[in-house]
Image: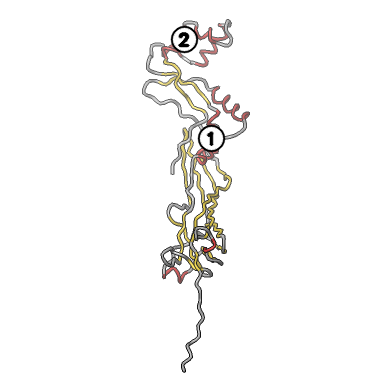
């Protein structure tokens, strides 16, 4: 799975080479400068910000790209850290990009990239099947071992990669078992279960529920079963960053009909 992550800071097109040269040489840059009136200071500053700008004075297709950051894409919650990042990135100054070439790729550290990529991921909730299924409603039986196993898009492992600039981060989420909580019964799962077959029956399973009451007292005639899957999350990145994140847990509720077998005791009819 690949994730797209919008960088916090990036380069965006500003003006063409010709427009910047006109802006500076016409004196308009001085008028807009915060140090208006001190041309002796403004020109060295502009030459530092737009190095060799005269060389692009006739270029109406190439662009100067300016560094920019946006708080809305910041993955943290510390304004001071964001301001530090903003200051470091924007201190690089504009970069000239000839027509047909790409702007410099924004640099994102591995940890920030990994956390932002993970925030964009949605892991589907678990789905299950079970055995036995008796009758038209597919009911299991009170007191019997009910095999349960994960089905469909229930992932045991999810791996996500994201790239920004020269940095690539790989995030891996791994789960070891289903956590089942039936309303009337007990569950024991040390894995994701295996489908019941006659062959598998001899081997056994790692996920069982034993119901202790029928579903008759529930409004819809089925017993609710809560299902959770907890994922341990780790990441590595090409810049050397690595670590772990908070455990991610998916939760859902399904229903299983449960029937009770009634045993009728009779005595043989006495013959005359």
Of labels 1 and 2, the one closer to you: 2
**Which of 212 and 188 lies nearest the eye of the viewer?**
212
Q: Residue at x 40, y 26 (%)?
A: 102
Q: Position of residue 28 (x, y in %)?
A: 49, 7
Viewer-nearest residue: 134 or 71? 134
- Residue depicted at x 46% and y 62%: 130
The colour style of the image is secondary structure
Q: Position of residue 74 (x, y in %)?
A: 55, 32
Residue at the farthest front position: 272
- The spot of residue 148 in percent (x, y) is 48, 62
Instruction: Mark 1 or mark 2: name the one nearer the start of the chain.
Output: 2
Q: Residue 33, located in which quarter of the rendered image? A: top right
Above or below, 102 relative to 203 = above
- Neighbour tally class for label 1: few under 14, some 14-19, many 20 plus, Cα within 10 Å: some
- With respect to residue 127, does 51 lie above or below? above
* Circle 1/circle 2 CB separation < 8 Å: no
**SS class, disc 1:** loop
Kindly identify which residue carries mark 2: 23
Label 1, label 2: how many angstroms apart (C-alpha)?
Answer: 35 Å
Residue indicated by mark 1 = 109
């Amino acid at each position: 799975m690949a994730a797209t992550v919008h960088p916090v800071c990036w380069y965006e097109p500003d003006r063409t080479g010709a427009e910047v040269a006109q802006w500076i040489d016409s004196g308009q840059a001085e008028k807009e400068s915060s140090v208006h009136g001190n041309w002796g200071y403004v020109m060295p500053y502009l030459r530092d910000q737009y190095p060799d700008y005269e060389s692009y004075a006739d270029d109406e297709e190439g662009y100067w790209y300016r560094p920019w950051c946006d708080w809305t894409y910041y993955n943290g919650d510390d304004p001071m850290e964001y301001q530090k990042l903003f200051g470091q990135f924007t201190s690089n100054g504009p970069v000239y990009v000839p027509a047909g070439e790409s702007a410099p790729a924004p640099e994102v550290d591995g940890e920030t990239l990994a956390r932002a990529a993970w925030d964009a991921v949605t892991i589907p909730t678990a789905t299950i099947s079970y055995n036995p299924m008796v009758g038209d409603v597919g009911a299991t039986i009170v007191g019997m071992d009910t095999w349960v196993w994960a089905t469909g898009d229930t992932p045991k492992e999810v791996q996500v990669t994201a790239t920004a600039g020269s940095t690539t981060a790989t995030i891996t989420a791994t789960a070891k078992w289903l956590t089942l909580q039936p309303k009337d019964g007990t569950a024991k799962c040390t894995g994701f279960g295996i489908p019941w077959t006659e062959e598998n029956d001899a081997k056994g399973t790692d996920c069982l529920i034993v119901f202790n009451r029928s579903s008759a007292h529930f409004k819809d005639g089925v017993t609710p079963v809560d299902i959770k899957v907890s994922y341990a999350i780790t990441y590595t990145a090409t810049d050397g960053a690595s670590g772990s994140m908070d455990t991610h847990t998916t939760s859902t509720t399904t229903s299983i009909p449960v029937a009770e077998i009634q045993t009728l005791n009779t005595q043989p009819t006495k013959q005359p």
